[in-house]
Amino acid sequence: MTAPIPPVPPMPRDIPELPAIPRTHRLLPSTVPAAAVVPPVRRPLAAILRVLIAGTAAAGVAFELRLDSAPRVLSHFAIQADILLAVVMLLSARRAWTASKPLPAALTGAALLYVTIVPLIHHVLHTTTASLLVHTVTPVAALLEWLLLTSPGRLRLRHAATWMAYPCAYLLFLLIRAELMTPGTPAHPLYPFLDPAAHGYRHTLTNALLLGLSFYALAVLLVALDHARPNPIHHRPKTGFRLQPPVG
């Protein structure tokens, strides 16, 4: 004989809730960079073009040094802007060649702003130096590099205020230089419209204020154009993700 099968106990109508699992740590959001999905892309053509722009800027500085003394030439805003642009272009070229992370937009935007303001200062206010490389070729090349070889949307409005630090420091340099230099010397003045000995400080500071407002307006315009211009660089990764690697 087999033992009788014990009856099955009835299912409870109310199943008791399980106790909540205590949270021992805060969950952090997870961000995946584009480089983790799409490998960085080398851009040798962009690197070569940037080296050429750096060479153009350096050639303009070298040409000006042959025409005048080094202290006077290197004191010009246009020459300093070209030197900064040459350094930035070389660094950007290296990063494009090695598929590295691009330079900060605040730095590249500053170099672009300073070199593009040079034609405005020269052609509108008629400054003393008149090199075609410094006042035309290099600014146009820098603007084309920005429009054709960089991705848009990287500049911010806060950058415009930061970029004004160097022009303000340069104005202070001009005023100190004007006080230290003897009127009538060959190295005096660099910019006649910013000469307090000839026009007085009130007129000079008024000109500096108008120039500074033009500087800031151009900076804001560059930021606005950066967010309105189309993207000239289109990478199509094979992973299915619509992510783009950093543009060097």
Image (cartoon, rainbow, N blue to C red):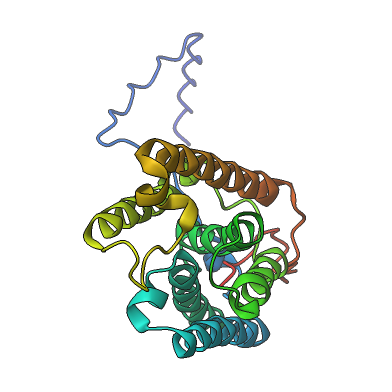
Q: Nearer the viewer, residue 107 or 72?
A: 72
Q: Is residue 41 visible?
A: no
Tell me where residue 124 appears, x and y as whole percent: 65, 55
Q: Is residue 15 visible?
A: yes
Please count the marks in the image: 0
Q: Indicate whether 155 appears above or below 126.
A: above
Q: Residue furthest left?
A: 180
Quadrant hosting residue 185 = bottom left
Tell me where residue 168 appears, x and y as whole percent: 37, 48
Tell me where residue 178 appears, x and y as whole percent: 30, 57
Residue occupying the point 60% across, 62% down: 122
Quarter of the image with the C terminus in it: bottom right
Residue occupying the point 70% across, 58% down: 242
Residue occupying the point 67% across, 72% down: 136
Q: Nearer the viewer, residue 236 or 15?
A: 236
Tell me where residue 182 appears, x and y as whole percent: 26, 63
Quadrant hosting residue 243 = bottom right
Left or right: 93 in relation to 171: right
Left or right: 171 in relation to 136: left
Q: Indicate whether 222 appears above or below 76.
A: above
Residue occupying the point 44% across, 32% down: 3
